């Protein structure tokens, strides 16, 4: 996953409207921490860097390097599972 990658959800994948789960064709993935906040920003128009910058505005006390690393790790795992596409 590159910081310039523009992401979108794979077909059949979407956030549950009220619960911290991601609906996928095989069932559900429980979301923890700020995962939902990251996934809410995947719109097919913003790149990873824009998502990180937006999160840093919301979580102003967070360490920028840690946020960037955590977001990239999460997105890499989700891309490997076929949930998102760059």
Image (cartoon, rainbow, N blue to C red):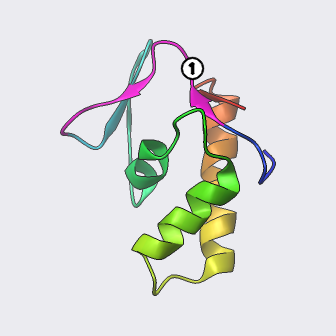
Residue occupying image coordinates x 70% and y 39%: 6
Please indicate whether residue 25 sits to the left or right of residue 70 in the image.
Answer: left
**Residue 26 drawn above or below residue 29:** above
Q: Residue at x 28, y 44 (%)?
A: 20
Q: Quadrant of the N terminus?
A: top right
**Part of the protein shown in magenta:** 7-18
Vertical side of 20 occupied by 29: above or below: above
State whether residue 75 appears in this view. Answer: yes
Q: Is residue 16 part of the magenta span, yes or no?
A: yes
**Badge 1 element:** loop
| Residue 72 makes an appearance in the image | no
Q: Quadrant of residue 26?
A: top left
Q: Residue furthest front?
A: 45
Q: Is residue 31 above or below residue 80?
A: below
Q: Quadrant of residue 5?
A: top right
Task: Residue at 43% x, 76% y: name it.
Answer: 59
Q: Magenta-highlighted stretch: main secondary structure?
A: loop
Residue on which disc 1 sits: 10
């Amino acid at each position: 996953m590159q910081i310039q990658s523009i992401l979108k959800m794979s077909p059949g994948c979407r956030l549950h409207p009220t619960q911290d789960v991601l609906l996928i064709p095989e069932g559900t993935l429980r979301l923890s921490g700020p995962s939902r906040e990251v996934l809410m920003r995947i719109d097919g128009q913003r790149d990873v860097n824009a998502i990180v910058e937006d999160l840093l505005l919301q979580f102003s006390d967070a360490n920028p390097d840690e946020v960037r690393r955590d977001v990239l790790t999460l997105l890499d795992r989700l891309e490997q599972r076929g949930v998102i596409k760059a």
